[in-house]
Image (cartoon, rainbow, N blue to C red):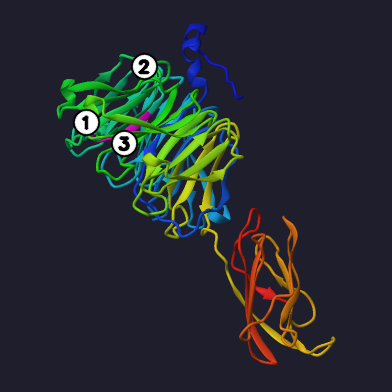
Amino acid sequence: MKTRQSIFPLATLLLLLALLVPLTLSASDPAVPIPTGGTTIRFTEHEIDYAFGGAYDVYYGDLDGDQDIDAVGAAYEADEIAWWENDGTPAQGAWTKYTIETGFWGANSLYAVDLDDDEDVDVLALAAIIHDIAWWENDGTPLDGGWTKHIIHDDFAFANAVYPVDLDDDGDMDILAAGGSITWWESDGTPGDGGWTEHLIGDDFTFSESVYASDLDGDDDVDVLAVTQYGDDVIWWENDGSPWDGGWVAYSIDDNFNRGRSVTAADLDGDTDTDVIGAAYDGDEIAWWENDGTPGNGGWTKHTILGGYTGARSVYVVDFDSDGHMDILSTARYENDISLWQNDGTPADGGWTRQVVTNSFDGASHACATDLDGDGDGDILGAAYEEDQIAWWEPSAPLQAQYLPLVFKKYVGGEEPGIVPEPGTWNCSPASGATVRFTVSEDSQSVSDGLMSNTACGSKSIAGPVPIEDNHFSLLHSDEVSFISATFDDVDHATGSYGIIVGDCWELSQMSCTH
């Protein structure tokens, strides 16, 4: 486990021990589509940075205004805020790192958001060790170091998480923060000139590790939601429409969520009210609370999505498969895991399908979703604390066969005339290096001598013979391997196709064929 030295005296350090294990602030996002129609989604990992010390949080935005999505991250060990420029070919590793700030001790929570309403994307972040909340103004030239730092608060005790939201409905972006209290800073529209006014929401708890804002009671103003470290509480505060006057009333959702580490909100069950989703770090749990429309009267029912999820760290809500139901991205530090939980529309009845994005991302800290490669489907962006890594994952289509036409020529040797591929092995080369070989014998009305091999998975035999009916044959292997078919136009010529149905380790990709 990573450790670090502190410049603070022992008493302060003891109070900060909980902060030495980094946390992540949850978020939600509009729908981003991926291909649908299968039961399994495969993800390809692409590295952005492998030396971002104690990668703690990651987010996204078009920082340089070039119409593709860049990444921005906070490094707890390196005390650094940085962004990576996407040149439009992210799968080729085309990311260039630019440091925004160093010496930001214990950088642990950040967002990319336009705080000054000048139509470029600024960066908001929080530092756990020096207790700072700051934002960096983007002057439109971020490639040339065009960042101006502004301090919002320089002594926010036990600083853990930050979240941008317009709490007072005046059209500019305010700031929420979680730590020894839940506090918000009202923007007067001139954030670059220090135009922030601090307002306390609540402090009747011991340390909050995540904060979020959403309209929980359906009254058209934005309420505030948090989880606490030692009280094991999930709490929401009702906004009465005058948040600057202390108009906040606290309500408990759950008082036994063991060290809640992340919280967010969305309508999971499609009943038009907002539900709550959380990750419990010591409880090793991902759960959601169903809102029955009376959240102020205790109208919450808890549903556990997964227990035994060791070091559950973050939750993020997004309609990843664009089916109209909100899905969940989760991370677990000690599982090294990022998982996608697909919601089939019946979440209260356990209608979740787990798609493991990765289980080898050492110290998985945070994950979010956006379209990084501009192909119209959603990608996943993640930070790994132990591995010091920022990476992203590109989803493939769900399991399905792909077919490639082949031409068969007349066979003139052997006991019976027939139609087979020309002598030699037909090498069909997806990324996995698959090889297919089989024989078609028209006169014997059968298919035989089949083999499929894969450099990663070894060889799998195709059983034969298979009868030919109506001048056509098809072969389905029982072990998730292959589909082969051919249609005979005449005795001298046949056209055919084959496809690989992806199993545990067969790669799915467009194939070309040579011999």
SS at circle 1: loop
**Disc 2 crowd, CA 10 A, few/some/many (<14, 14-19, 20+):** many
Spatial CA span between label 1 and label 3: 11 Å
Where, quadrant-wise, is the N terminus in this rendering?
top right
Question: How many numbered marks appear?
Answer: 3
Identify the mark nearer the N-term, 2 or 3: 2
**In the depicted view, which residue is nearer to us: 111 or 482?**
482
- Residue 168 position, x and y percent, is 19, 32
User: Residue 174's x, y, as percent?
Assistant: 26, 32
Q: Which residue is mark 1?
A: 294
Q: Earlier in the sequence, mark 1 or mark 3?
A: 3
Measuring 39% from the left and 16% from the top, which residue is drawn there?
Answer: 231
- Residue span colored magenta: 162-167
Q: Are marks 2 and 3 in contact (CB under 8 Å)?
A: no
Please tell me whether residue 163 belongs to the stretch shown in magenta: yes
Q: Disc 3 marks which amino acid?
A: Asp
10 Å neighbourhood of mark 1: few (<14), some, or many (≥20)? few
Helix, strand or loop at mark 2: loop
Q: Is residue 77 magenta?
A: no
The residue under label 2 is 180
Instruction: Give left or right: position of 199 versus 33.
Output: left
Quadrant placement of the C terminus: bottom right
Classify mark 3: helix, strand or loop: strand
Q: Earlier in the sequence, mark 2 or mark 1?
A: 2
Q: From what the image shows, is residue 159 above or below residue 137?
A: above
For badge 2, the amino acid type reads Gly
Residue at screen point 44% across, 19% down: 130
Nearer the observer: mark 2 or 1; the answer is 1
Residue 123 visible to an observer of this rendering: yes
- For marks 2 and 1, give the CA distance: 28 Å
Q: On the image, numbered disc 3 is attached to which residue?
A: 275
